[in-house]
Amino acid sequence: MSLGRDALGFALAPLPVVLPFMLLFGYVLIDVPSDGPSAIEALIEIIAACYGATLLIGVPVHVVLRRLKLDSLGAYLSGALVGVVAVGGSAAIVSAMTPPPKSPNPFAIPILTITEVLAGLALVCASVFWLVAVRARRHDQPPISG
């Protein structure tokens, strides 16, 4: 029973990130149908990145927190932040070790800004997972539905 809640939590956790992009790309497809293939390709990449991050960060955080018997929302939010900061820090180190481009890109977004945005999105996703999987198990009640 707990595995079902966990699976449902992992399936639903990325949706707060994915759904706005689906609506945005749906609007693009209605407005400019010729951009359909590129919009669908971008949406597939976003979905893959969201679920990939859930597997890369969310699953290990959940396993560690279950092993430590921590089930508070704060623990899950902290775990998500630690995971995002670790990935962002790794990206910053790799970026610092690579030589700068000969001509700087005026449209480049700093890694710190990207990490801040990802941290905010990770908090929302961790909250959704906690509500669906952990809180329901914690209070021994069925998962939240509609």
Image (cartoon, grey):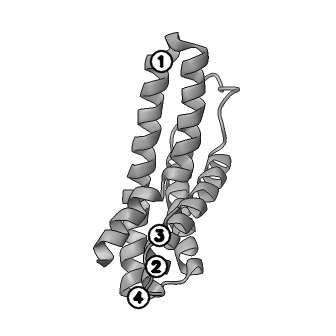
> Of the residues under marks 2 and 4, which one precedes in the sequence?
4
Q: Is residue 60 above or below residue 73?
A: above
Q: Residues within 10 Å of mark 2 (few under 14, many from 20)?
A: some
> Of the residues under marks 3 and 1, which one precedes in the sequence?
1
> In the image, what residue occupies the spot 36% across and 76% down?
63
Q: Nearer the viewer, residue 87 or 137?
A: 137
> In the image, what residue occupies the spot 51% across and 10% down?
34
Q: Which residue is mark 2?
A: 136
Left or right side of 112 for 19 = left
> In the image, what residue occupies the spot 60% across and 32% down?
24
> Of the residues under marks 1 and 2, which one precedes in the sequence?
1
Instruction: Give the foreground label among 1 and 2.
Output: 2
Q: In terms of image quadrants, where is residue 62? A: bottom left
Point out which mark residue 36 bears: 1
Q: CA distance from mark 1 to mark 2?
A: 40 Å
Q: Is residue 106 above or below residue 37?
A: below
Across and down, in percent, residue 29 comes to 54, 20
Across and down, in percent, residue 14 comes to 48, 53
Q: Amino acid at mark 1?
A: Gly
Point out which mark residue 20 bears: none
Q: Nearer the viewer, residue 48 or 9?
A: 9
Badge 3 element: helix
Mark 2 touches mark 3? (CB < 8 Å) = yes
Instruction: Give the foreground label among 1 and 4.
Output: 1
Q: Which residue is mark 4?
A: 68
Q: CA distance from mark 2 to mark 4?
A: 18 Å
Q: Amino acid at mark 3?
A: Val
Q: Quadrant of the N terminus?
A: bottom left
Instruction: Give the foreground label among 3 and 1.
Output: 3
Q: Which residue is mark 3?
A: 132
Mark 3 touches mark 4? (CB < 8 Å) = no
Mark 2 touches mark 4? (CB < 8 Å) = no
